[in-house]
Amino acid sequence: MDRTQSQSVFDRARRVMPLGVTSNFRYWGDDSTLIAQRAKGAYLWDVDGNRYIDYRLGFGPAILGHALDAIDDHVREALHDGVIYAMTTEREVRVAERIVAMCPAVEMVRFANSGTEATMHALRVARAYTGRDKVLKFEGQYHGMYDYVLWSTYQPVETMGSRRDPIPVQASSGIPAAIRDLIITLPFNDFELLERRVREQWHSLAAIIVEPMLGNCASITPQPGFLELIRKLCDEYGIVMIMDEVKTGFRVARGGAQELYKVNPDLATYAKSLGGGGYPIAAFGGKREVMEIIGHGVAHGGTYTGNTLGLAAAEKTLEILATTDALEVVAQRGKQLQKGMSDILETKGIPFAFAGHPSMFGVVLSDHEPRDYRDWARSDHAMYDKIAVECIERGVMPDPDSREPWFLSSAHSEQDIAESLTAFEDAVNAVAG
Ligand SMILES: Cc1ncc(COP(=O)(O)O)c(C=O)c1O
């Protein structure tokens, strides 16, 4: 594949932006960081004109495919009336009503602009509601780019201590060490350890924040009863359960993971699919009793919250998701892809397991689905990453990091899946011989 243009733009980018990117996750190396030209439906083109069937979808948001005309037209129309007013709009109320109608645990909602902002505000609400400061999160889970939660996300497992007594590890320099006192990190799906820690520390624990499915670690699923245990412990000890649905929301079901697993959190956070093709909008919401403390001594706001761009995109996206079979199509395509991949990996005799939901699934080269981040680290992710790179060379683009799931959209056609499987088979052959 010719990458001359990408390289030349990237060389310019490096001179004016650290690493040549605007998010560290987008840096693939000095000689392999691609520059995008455009995206439409299931496809993305780089500046050299190479076309890829896209399974990253901008890290998940493009649930209906890129640049869906129905969403873009609706946004364009809405923009004629301006973008921000420092006032509530009726459109905002309509979108809030739609979210409340779709998400079983959400009775009230407030908007934000990114997943980071949504989880950040949810944590503040939880702390204010409980009068406690500590937050429990799970290793390998990612909740955004800020100091309270950027712990034990992508670090090498060896730095995280014993699984019986995990050490929270900063994911970046610049995070104050003092925050360590406010965070507890545990392996996902460890019933006994969770129960023990909560019983020891509940009096200072404001929230348990959980990605119901590890959208940032191969989509590892909760063991039956694990989310229910979090729910039970939160009820017992007056802790706020926050389900971070930034990746699962409006994707694994219309009402997200809370609908899929039938576990209602106290608060939930949304972004990504909420904005259809990637318009910047996020939300957090939940029980009326918890949400109603906002404005009564609890701060939330932001100049751009509730802007027309994001809201109009959300309005059309949610209408489509609520009234069509788009999510069924997404899941169906995911199943087709999984079936084909299974056949290919089985034929090759490569041990593998799928994790997650067909709409966002991880491919783990291991003889079982991992239970947690530490378990994923023991899989052959080095081999997976090589296969992913070979897929990209063949015009099929999963993320080159096996922690990032394959994201499907309703724009992926059966033909796209068939083409992807041919590329996947060639990629597996190129790596495994
Ligand atoms: C589960 C989860 N929460 C929060 C975030 C942060 O969202 P954003 O990148 O919009 O700030 C992400 C981003 O990938 C995420 O996957």
Image (spheres, grey):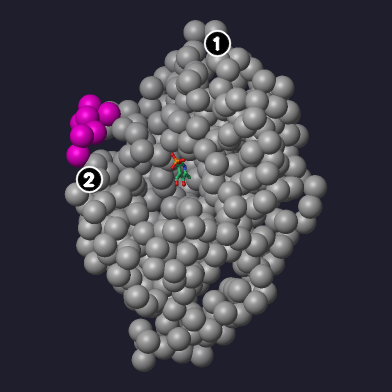
Say whether residue 9 is left or right of residue 92.
left
Residue 256 makes an appearance in the image: no
- Quadrant in which residue 35 is drawn: bottom left
Magenta residues (range): 173-179
- Residue in view at x 57 percent, y 79 percent: 419
Please identify, in this view, whether the residue under mark 2 or under mark 1 is nearer the observer.
2
Residue 157 in percent (x, y) is at 27, 56
Q: Quadrant of the N terminus?
A: bottom left
The kind of residue tagged 1 is Gly
Q: Which residue is mark 1?
A: 295
> Could you give the CA–CA distance between mark 2 and mark 1, rounded to whole angstroms?
41 Å
Of residue 367 and residue 387, the one placed in the foreground of this image is 387
Say whether residue 231 is left or right of residue 318.
left
- Residue in view at x 67 percent, y 60 percent: 410
- Residue in view at x 36 percent, y 38 percent: 145
Of residue 27 and residue 249, the one placed in the foreground of this image is 27
Which circle's residue, 2 or 1, is located before the other in the chain? 2
